[in-house]
Amino acid sequence: MRFKREEIEAIEWRRETAAFEKTLMKYIVRSLLRLGTGSSALDVGCNDGLFTKELCQCFSHVVGIDASSDHVERARRQVPQAEFHVALVEEFAPADELFDTIYMLNILEHLDNPVEVLKRVKSWLSPDGYVIIQVPNALSLNRRIGQKMGLISNLYELTSHDVEVGHKRFYDSESLKRDVIASGLQVESMGSIFLKPFSNPQMEWFVNSEAWNRGLMGWGGEDKTVDWREKLCDALYEMAKEVPQYSGPIWARCMK
């Protein structure tokens, strides 16, 4: 692992304060919840429990794990009905329990040995269960634009921000499928979630900008009462279904 446990504890990140992160989570929930099955779910890397809370609407037994005790404490306060553990995915060992659905959102790109971790996760899965994996897409529109602008030399390059947050790699659909198959899991289906034209910080400015309130963004036409941010984001969500190779994040639904 790039980060030791004490380094993970020191990372400052608050998803609920980022407008675009909350917006994107809405589409993640809309896309991924429907892929689950059964009565029990495991949220690997649960962070602040925002997604875990949604799982509790669909599963009777929900467990979340995260390497940060701060994240887990926040998740416990937000989702008291779920069970939480402070643990690295490489070290977690559920006590004689198999899960019907295991969610791994933005996990594989952080791991030294994603295939080995997937093998461990496979052993926690019930016979008819699914592992739902989500990762950033190296071939996404925002990275393609970034390459054309000279911000990255190739689509798989890690930026300084990627290194700072512990990314080890970028996936595309084919490399994600290869790692899944190498672990002994099978890919049942794949898809994408959102056509993101800009980086997360740029999207944050876009959805938060005061220019919207002053009618300067050019989307509202004559009707200044319409907030076109939501309409635009809904359109980008729908567009991801039409051009998945340009969209991100991407997901895979996997089974034994």
Image: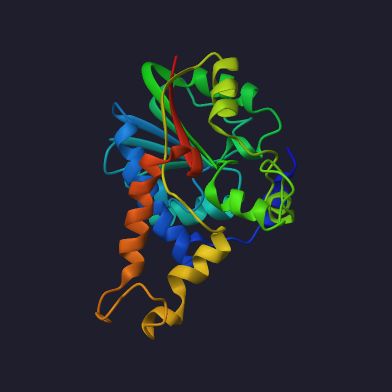
Q: Is residue 137 left or right of residue 189?
A: right
Asked if residue 81 shows in the view, the reply is no
Is the residue 108 above or below the residue 231 in the image? Answer: above
Name, please, the residue furthest toward the bottom: 214
- In this view, the residue in front, 203 or 35, is 203
**What residue do we see at 55% from left, 59% from top?**
200
For the rendered model, the colour scheme is rainbow
Asked if residue 46 shows in the view, the reply is yes
Residue 117 appears at what percent x and percent y?
A: 61, 26
- In this view, the residue in front, 224 or 253, is 224
**What residue do we see at 55% from left, 41% from top?**
137
Dividing the picture into quarters, in which one does residue 90 lie? top right
Is the residue 165 above or below the residue 205 in the image? Answer: above
**What residue do we see at 60% from left, 35% from top?**
171
**What residue do we see at 75% from left, 42% from top?**
2
The quarter of the image holding the C terminus is top left
Q: Is residue 199 left or right of residue 124?
A: right
Residue 223 appears at what percent x and percent y?
A: 24, 79
Residue 138 appears at what percent x and percent y?
A: 60, 41
Q: In this view, does 110 lie to the left or right of 215?
A: right
Residue 61 appears at what percent x and percent y?
A: 33, 34
- In this view, the residue in front, 228 or 249, is 228
- How many numbered discs sit on the rendered protein? 0
Is the residue 155 above or below the residue 159 in the image? Answer: above
The quarter of the image holding the N terminus is top right
Is the residue 243 above or below the residue 37 in the image? Answer: below
